[in-house]
Amino acid sequence: MTRPLNYRVLFLLVVLLVAGMVQILREHRPSWLRPGLRLNAYVSAADGSVAVVDLVRLSVIARVAIGAGLSGMREHPTRPEIWGVSTTGGYVWILEARSNQVVARIPVGPAPYGLDFSPDGRRAYTTASGADSLVVIDVITRSIIATAHTGSGPVLARSTSDGKHILVVNRRDATLRIYGADSLASQAVVPVVEAPEDVAILPDNSVAFVISRQKRFVSVVDLKGGVLLANLELSGTPSSMILKPDGGELYVISPESHGLQSVNTWTHEVRDSVVLGSSPTQGVLSSDANLLYVSDKAAGRVTPVDMSNRRVMRPILVGQAPGRCRFDPGEKLLLVVNEDSGDLAVIRVGTNSLLTMIPVGDHPRDLAVKLF
């Protein structure tokens, strides 16, 4: 005698199967939305190579030898290309994403550290710290089209979002220099915090914030007037800063103070602080500004923070010395570079759970993500 079929159990199994398939399709949407669509991460290593990680298959698909002293790696905003600089070699390099081949090395001068693109993606900007110069590259022809003299030891060039100005951070003479993007004419030289290394610009391009990783201050610069507004004292030396998409708050992360501080960008006041762990270093903020993930280099973990309520959530254990963090374009995956264990941690954002650890090379540092 056969038992009657339990339709409730069967229905539940079907529902679970459909839910599982939907979740898989969401996580692998680049492969089914369009067959030729690819989603890759690019991780630079200490040996001068870049590991190409397929984020659908969650595996390394190529290792590309580029050169010593890789830094400042970024995905081009419109072209299937990854750009970066070789500080040791004194050149900008371009990796073609479809073929995983280096298609250009452009000499720019001694000791470049980073680069930026114009809002339309037609120009790339870098600095040669050893030659005190700003270099402008035409993205299409891959050639230098202009240079300008900077202050002493330029380490960073950033374009404003309207494309009208370029800001150059000069480390040795502690200045922020403002250039007109069309003429490269120097429009203002503003003294800032000693040994500056990074700059954040408000979306309306009215104010810039400059930090040093050696001093407990953030400099506030009026870009329209070309003057220093304030040097705001922090509770510890900062390692990085993150600006809210609407520009309303600036979050400054400090290993020394074991957390972050928020700066009101309208009143230029240092406001509340959040304790995060042993040595918080870098972070990434969701596009809706509700969720911030901060890597803790000493504790080997990433800490999610509910920014609406300033609530620290359960940390996620990753590898050794986690540093650079990035989302995939859909913010379904969080990628974390582990510098000492030599791998890339992949975290599912929906559940804050570790999916896998992918070996990428010795002492990886920079991280870029490209959907193409």
Image (cartoon, rainbow, N blue to C red):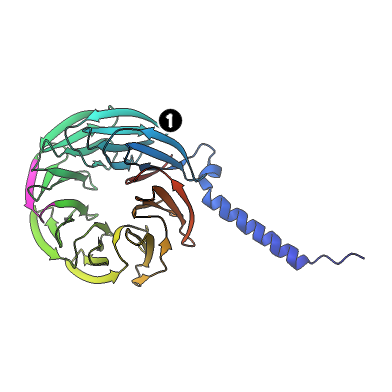
Q: Nearer the viewer, residue 70 or 4?
A: 70
Q: How many marks?
A: 1
Instruction: Report if residue 320 lies within the magenta region.
Output: no
Instruction: Report if residue 189 lies within the magenta region.
Output: yes
Q: Secondary structure at mark 1?
A: loop
Compared across the picture, whether 263 is left or right of 310 comes to left
Q: Which residues are magenta?
A: 186-195
Image spot of residue 107 (x, y percent): 21, 29
Compared across the picture, whether 363 is left or right of 178 comes to right
Task: Name the image quarter holding residue 159.
Answer: top left
Image spot of residue 165 (x, y percent): 17, 44
Image spot of residue 319 (x, y percent): 40, 55
Q: Is residue 175 above or below residue 247?
A: above
Q: Is residue 106 above or below residue 364?
A: above
Q: Which corner quadrant holds the N terminus?
A: bottom right
Secondary structure mostly seen in magenta is: strand
